[in-house]
Image: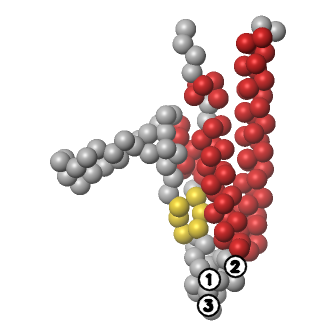
Amino acid sequence: MQFSFEKALGIHEPALHTQSRRAQILAANVANADTPKFKARDIDFHAALELAQKYPKGYGPLTTSNTRHIQPAGFRYGYEVLYRQPRQASIDGNTVETETEMSEYTENSVRYMASLRFLGGKIQTLQSAIKGQ
């Protein structure tokens, strides 16, 4: 029987990667809260996880406009960074709403910690199986 880390660790590896990237984007939003014309961005976490579940190795279908183009190898943890729609527009064109960004950052941090704990439990289980306990 062949062992696969992708199967053993499940969705937690791509989830951690996506949550880490999302934390960077949200932190950049907060840091640029006073920058004129800065547009707040975010990742649709649920869509990114669905994509990771659909393509467990991280490679999905990429399209080309011509059959003679070189076929791309694929992508790893593909997700689209989207612009956030503000609830109330600011005069200077900045779309960052600090309260929203901090709330999203906190929720993302909780999810990140939960994924780390699940992943830690799976690794402990694997270590016990290897030791024969």
Q: How busy is the neighbourhood of tag 3: few (under 14 within 10 Å), some, or many (20 plus)?
A: few
Q: Tell which circle, 2 or 1, labels the residue nearer the N-terminal end.
A: 2
Residue 117 position in % (x across, y down): 78, 36
* Residue 118 position (above or below residue 63): above
Identify the residue position indicated by label 1 in the image: 94
Disc 2 to disc 1: CB gap under 8 Å: yes
Give the residue type that dot 1 points to.
Answer: Asn
Quadrant of residue 90 within the rendered picture? bottom right
Q: Tell which circle, 3 or 2, labels the residue nearer the N-terminal end.
A: 2
Question: In this orientation, which residue lies closer to the viewer: 73 or 82?
Answer: 73
Disc 1 to disc 3: CB gap under 8 Å: yes
Question: In this orientation, which residue lies closer to the viewer: 86 or 33?
Answer: 33
Q: How busy is the neighbourhood of tag 1: few (under 14 within 10 Å), some, or many (20 plus)?
A: some
Identify the residue position indicated by label 2 in the image: 33
Could you tell me if residue 132 is visible in this image? Answer: yes
Question: In this orientation, which residue lies closer to the viewer: 107 or 67?
Answer: 67
Q: Quadrant of the N terminus?
A: top right
Residue 64 position in % (x across, y down): 27, 51
Residue 44 position in % (x across, y down): 57, 56
Residue name at image x 72 percent, y 54 percent: 108
